[in-house]
Amino acid sequence: MDRLWAPWRLEYIQAPEADCCIFCIDEDQTADPQRLIVSRGDSCYVMMNRYPYSNGHLMVSPYRHLADPAELDVPEVQELHRLMVLSQAVLRDSCAAQGFNVGWNFGQAAGAGITAHIHMHIVPRWAGDSNFMPILADTRVIPQHIEKTYALLANAFS
C-alpha cells in the first residue's frame, strides 16, 4: 500500500479558529515570508494559499476588511484585476501553468472558509493534473514544498 504523507493538513484541520483575520495585514513587510505574501500593491496584495488546491495556489485580497465585493471602490477593483492578471503571468513563467481556475467564494454556503474578508483564488492547472487521488482518496497531491514554491514565486513577482 502506498502512503501519501501530508502532515501540514492535520495542522489545518485541528487548528482553532483564528482570533484575527489572516487577510488583515499591516505595513510591516518583514513578516511577508511567514504570511506567504508574494506581492503588494497600493490597495490589494497577493498571498499564497497555505493549504493549496494545487502547487502555486494564490489569493488576491484588498487590504480593507470587506465581506462584500459591492463595497470595493474602483481603484481596488482595478488593482484586484491587475494583480490577478499579473499572478497568471507569474505562474505561467515560473511554474509553466497551462490554465487557471479563478474565482470567489462569498459566504459559508458558497464554500468560503473565511467569510468576513473577500479574496480571489487563482489556481494554476496543467494538462493531466487531475488524477485518481482527489476522486478516490479525497486527497490532493502537491508536488512542491510550500517554502520552495514561496521562494520561486516571491522572486518571480519581484
Image (cartoon, helix red, strand yellow):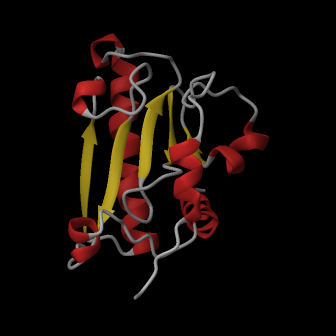
Q: Nearer the viewer, residue 62 or 77?
A: 62
Q: Is residue 90 among what the camera can see? A: yes
Name the residue at 40% across, 23% down.
76
Name the residue at 43% across, 19% down.
116
Q: Residue furthest bottom?
A: 1
Image quarter (top left, top right, bottom left or bottom right) of the C terminus: bottom right
Q: Is residue 131 among what the camera can see? A: no
Q: Nearer the viewer, residue 57 or 87?
A: 57
Instruction: Give how far across and how far down residue 97 sits, in percent.
Output: 33, 70
Name the residue at 53% across, 24% down.
63
Is 157 above or below relative to 46? below
Q: For this view, does 137 lie left or right of residue 86?
A: left
Q: Residue furthest top?
A: 71
Quadrant position of residue 71: top left
Name the residue at 59% across, 61% down.
150
Image quarter (top left, top right, bottom left or bottom right) of the N terminus: bottom left
Total marks placed: 0
Instruction: Give how far across and how far down residue 88 sits, in percent.
Output: 35, 57
Is 3 above or below relative to 83? below
Q: Nearer the viewer, residue 148 or 114?
A: 114
Quadrant position of residue 140: bottom left
Q: For this view, does 56 lie left or right of residue 40?
A: left
Instruction: Give how far across and how far down residue 107 sits, in percent.
Output: 29, 23
Q: For this view, does 4 lie left or right of residue 146?
A: left
Instruction: Give how far across and how far down residue 157 sits, in percent.
Output: 54, 56
Quadrant position of residue 136: bottom left
Is 13 above or below relative to 52? above
